[in-house]
Amino acid sequence: MTQRVVVIGGGLGGLSAAVALAQKKIAVTLLEAQPHVGGYAVSFSRQGWTFDPALHVTAAGGAGQEFRRLVDGLGLGDAVRFLPLPDGFRVRLGAYDFPLPNDYAAIFERLAAA
């Protein structure tokens, strides 16, 4: 029996999931509502203005971590370089404002506490 998976959403998460599954020889169907994939990594224009909401910060880009392994698995290891943020970064959602560390495990701890 062949394994088949449907991934809903062609943003960075959906594309990452689809690639990881395909690398494991699992048949993948990717469904995306927009006319293009990429989610927030794709620029768009509205009323004559062009916006670039591209990904600027990601977790798990260190040696042996999930995002680094995905990039390496795509054969992009030499083309993509991750720079660590020494102090992490801040998340602001309306009045909600909190710091996130640059350590992957600590991010989950901080989010769980929030």
Image: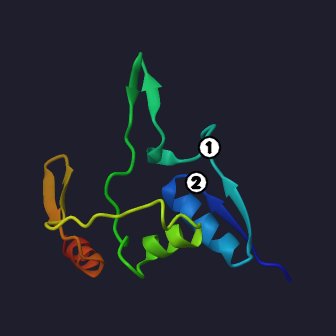
Coordinates of residue 90 in the picture (x, y in percent): 17, 58
Coordinates of residue 74 in the picture (x, y in percent): 59, 67
Mark number, residue 58? none
Q: Quadrant of residue 45?
A: top left
Q: How crowded is mark 1: few (under 14 residues within 10 Å), some or many (20 or more)?
A: few
Question: Which amino acid type is marked by label 1?
Answer: Ala
Q: Horizontally, is 39 left or right of 82 in the view? A: right
Distance in Å between CA atoms under marks 2 and 1: 7 Å
Mark number, residue 33? 1
Coordinates of residue 77 in the picture (x, y in percent): 49, 68
Question: Which amino acid type is marked by label 2?
Answer: Gly
Query: Which residue is pictured at 69% across the width and 70% down the height?
Result: 22
Considering only vertical position in the picture, is 35 above or below 41?
A: above
If the image is split into quadrants, where does the N terminus sit?
bottom right
Mark number, residue 9? 2
Q: So how many labels did they put on this image? A: 2
